[in-house]
Amino acid sequence: MKQILWACDFYEDSLFAGQIAAEIAGPTGATLHAVNIMRLPFKHEKNTAEWLERKNALEKRLEGIAADLARGGIGVSYEVIESEATGKVILERAEALHADIIAMGRAGLPGEENYAGSTARQVLYGTRRPVLIARGMDMLPKIDRVLVTTDLSGPSFVALDFALPLARAFSAPVHLLFVYEFVDIPPTSDEMDSALDELRLAIKTKGLSEGEVKPEVISHPESGDGIAKYITANNIPLTVMSARGASGLERWLLGSTTERVIKLSSWPLIVVKE
């Protein structure tokens, strides 16, 4: 991992995403690049003292954050960009930097409380790069475990491939979770055991041990809800999910497992595309 792009708007979710990004940058040796997108000035504001003062204040704030992170041994760069197309700029900068992760707050810009219309969603739709989505929390979680979800399809294991080197950087185990969905009747113990055997076979096929990747199976009527409840109940500090599943189709429609987890969970989540 070499570059993490942090989309910083100085709101709570975004600042927390930056903290998580910095936590990842430390042990992985990645450089953190912070970008703030400032709206274009109105005609009466252009080159006025008030406008320039605001822009300088944003740059000074980024400079202060960068200095704090640099003292912790993290490589940091930053920039303020004037644009109305926030999502477009984030996508363009991520490509220019060849970002390994795009880190951003769940809510996006002010007034975008509904995730369905947020800048975060625009970036998730528009990039092929992993996206770290975070919501502000009272304290920074220690990354001592990494949860990876799978539906047992080949494409879903791309999340495991991404998570393994990240977990190794933290000397943290990976928990590989499969949610056995059911409609009316919960799966039998034999069915649950069969799913667990499939997980174990997948781990073995990848040449991994259950000491490094721990298989887990739960049942729930809806996989997204089940994953979100599991994350909350177990205080999972970081989850990695694939955006593709058994259907082979992009899962960016409202109601998809990935979006459901983003909406329901308060814990950091990295979405990986195939």
Image (cartoon, rainbow, N blue to C red):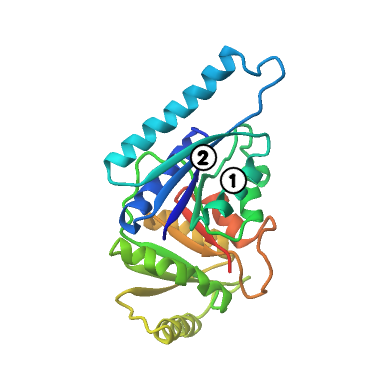
| Numbered disc 1: secondary structure | helix
Q: Is residue 145 left or right of residue 54?
A: left
The alpha-carbon separation of the residues under discs 1 and 2 comes to 8 Å
Q: As displayed, is residue 167 above or below residue 203? A: above
x and y percentages locating residue 261 in the rendered image: 55, 56
**Residue 262: x, y in percent?**
55, 52
What amino acid is found at the position of numbered circle 2 in the picture?
Val
User: Looking at the image, which is closer to me, 261 or 160?
Assistant: 160
Q: Secondary structure at mark 2?
A: strand
Residue 270: x %, y % from top left: 49, 57
The N terminus - image quarter: bottom left
Kindly identify which residue carries mark 2.
Answer: 35
Instruction: Return the disc, 1 or 2, that comes first in the chain's sequence.
Output: 2
Q: Residue at x 46, y 67 (%)?
A: 162
Tag 2: Cα neighbours inside 10 Å, few (<14), some, or many (≥20)?
many
The label on residue 90 is 1
Report how many numbered discs are placed on residues in the image: 2
Closer to the camera in the image, 219 or 262: 262
Q: Which mark is residue 58?
A: none
Residue sitting at x 51%, y 40%: 35
Quadrant where the C terminus is found in the figure: bottom right
Residue at image position (49%, 27%) is 58
Q: Nearer the viewer, residue 145 or 179?
A: 145
Q: Are marks 1 and 2 in contact (CB under 8 Å)?
A: yes
Q: Amino acid at mark 1?
A: Ile
Give percent across and percent down for residue 16: 43, 41
Vertical placement of residue 260 versus 171, above or below: above
